[in-house]
Image (cartoon, helix red, strand yellow):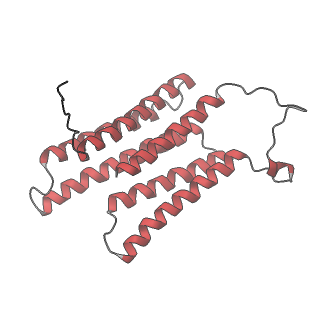
Amino acid sequence: MNRILLIAVVGAVAALGVRLAKAVPPPPQPGNGTATTAKENNGNAESLDVRYARAQVALAEANLKKVSSMNQRVAGAVSGDVVRAYELDLEVAKLQLQVAQGGPESQFDIWLARAEAGEKYAQTLWRGATAANQHAAGAVDPNEVERLRLSAELAKLEVERGHALVHATPEAKLAWQLDLLNGQLHQVMEELRQTVPSSRVYLYER
């Protein structure tokens, strides 16, 4: 789970870096001022953004195929919430490809999709923990169930904040993207704290 969250956050960091880079006009290109890729020179107008988005879709498909094949070999080898996380990753990657291809969606739609995927995943974890306790009382610590509920509620509010900014200024949208990214980073750190024992501190006399 931690690895999936970390991968998602790294992807979000990379996407935000691209967004910030695009906010600064690039230096003029030599010649007629038109930048082209090697494929464009050969008559293929597919841009680097599209090729990069295609690669992301391919990787997301490969990740999902891997966990699905593991469950085919051994039922339950990979938990349902982890499989769902990979499915959501693929949905976001496909949307990013549509945007790169010039679809009606925008880069902000990708961030909304990421927020919505995060909410769906948080809801899956909370409902799974609740269902486990309904089948076997005490299967999941009540404090953990409450923590998951609050995480799901926070993710829902983050989505609502994003949708409220659809027609806002670019600066307001960017501020929300930074908040979303910060929240995801905090979630990764919190998951690590929940699963990794605290390091012991040894004091040595000198």
Give the percent coordinates (x, y) of residue 35: 81, 38
Residue 98 appears at what percent x and percent y? Answer: 62, 50
Q: Is residue 32 above or below residue 52?
A: above
Task: Pick the residue in front: 140 or 149.
Answer: 140
Q: Position of residue 5 (x, y in %)?
A: 39, 47
Question: Could you say which quadrant of the image residue 29 lies in?
Answer: top right
- The answer to whether any part of residue 195 appears in the image is yes
**Quadrant the C terminus occupies:** top left
Q: Residue 88: image x %, image y %?
A: 45, 54
Residue 9 placement: quadrant: top left
106 vs 203, left or right, is right
**Direction left: furthest residue:** 137
Residue at image x 40%, y 51%?
4
- Residue drawn at point x = 34 percent, y = 52 percent: 1
Looking at the picture, does residue 26 appear above or below residue 112? Answer: above
Taking 36 as reference, is 12 left or right? left
Looking at this view, name the residue that lies furthest to the bottom: 73
Which one is nearer the viewer's eye here, 127 or 64?
64
Query: As drawn, is 31 to the left or to the right of 198?
Result: right
For this orientation, the residue located farthest to the front is 206
**Residue sitting at x 67%, y 25%:** 24
Say which of 129 and 13 sits in front: 13
Does any portion of residue 103 appear in the rendered image?
no
